[in-house]
Amino acid sequence: DAKTTQPTSMDCAEGRAANLPCNHSTISGNEYVYWYRQIHSQGPQYIIHGLKNNETNEMASLIITEDRKSSTLILPHATLRDTAVYYCIVKGGGSNYKLTFGKGTLLTVNP
Amino acid sequence: GAVVSQHPSWVICKSGTSVKIECRSLDFQATTMFWYRQFPKQSLMLMATSNEGSKATYEQGVEKDKFLINHASLTLSTLTVTSAHPEDSSFYICSARGRANTEAFFGQGTRLTVV
């Protein structure tokens, strides 16, 4: 699975949009981009995933560049409860469903 | 999303004893379950992958005789930490995916403390 690079930490004001970047320049054609987050002392929570097209659900939007070498997770109106470590993971769509977690981005939403 | 329940949420045990952690998929059939371990201030590390009815596949460096995994049904997997030692103290997390899912869903984790 391709390696990802994320900033170590980010801050965001409550009510503003949080834009979390992820670089995955070695991604291959059949690999998906997944985003999970982990609130302190809890298990990770699935957020969203995509292959080529931008995706949106009730939690977030995922913007993938045309060359697929990077993506951005957008939380449109961050709340204090969105403070968590956000993991960007690239994974093939075949039978290997193992998720390899990097260090992620600690997003702190400030009042 | 789908619900995965892990039990217990926390456990304290004496050194040398064994501890069993359960992971259940509540609203879907989990064809594959994963067990992770997370030490403080570190990321999740995959320990093993189990498919229902098959033996678990362990990651390099994980002792299969110490961390016993059973995936006897499509809704239940168990991790038994045998002869636990203080260095086994960690946050253990399971995840599960169903046949129709590409994403995996996680339990809430189990905090194991060995004294």
Image (cartoon, grey):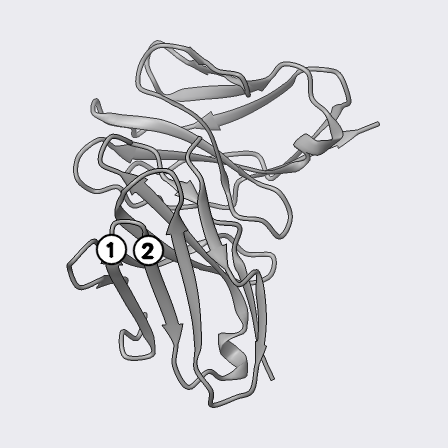
Mark pair 2, 1: CA separation: 5 Å
Residue drawn 26% across the image and 41% down it: A97
Residue drawn 59% across the image and 65% down it: B10
Q: Is residue A24 visible?
A: no
Q: Is residue B85 left or right of residue B56?
A: right
Residue lying furthest bottom: B16
Q: Residues within 10 Å of mark 1 (few under 14, many from 20)?
A: some
Chain ID for label 2? B
Pick whichever, B113 or A32, lies toward us. Answer: B113
Chain ID for label 1? B
Which residue has dot 1 on it? B73
Is label 2 on the same chain as label 1?
yes
Question: Whole-percent x and y of residue A4?
Answer: 41, 35
Are the two marked residues, 2 and 1, in contact with CB atoms closer than 8 angstroms? yes
Q: Secondary structure at mark 2?
A: strand
Task: State which quarter of the image contains the C terminus of chain A.
Answer: top right
The amino acid type of the residue labelled 2 equals Leu
- Looking at the image, residue A9 lies above or below residue A13: below
Q: Is residue A87 left or right of residue A3?
A: right
Residue drawn 54% across the image and 82% down it: B86
Q: Residues within 10 Å of mark 2 (few under 14, many from 20)?
A: many
Question: Whole-percent x and y of residue A33?
Answer: 36, 27
Q: Secondary structure at mark 1?
A: strand
The amino acid type of the residue labelled 1 equals Ser
Question: Which numbered disc covers residue A100?
Answer: none
Question: Whole-percent x and y of residue B15?
Answer: 52, 88
Which residue has dot 2 on it? B76
Residue lying furthest right: A111
Pick whichever, B9 or B111, lies toward us. Answer: B9
Residue B55 occupies quadrant: bottom left
Question: Whole-percent x and y of residue B81?
Answer: 40, 76
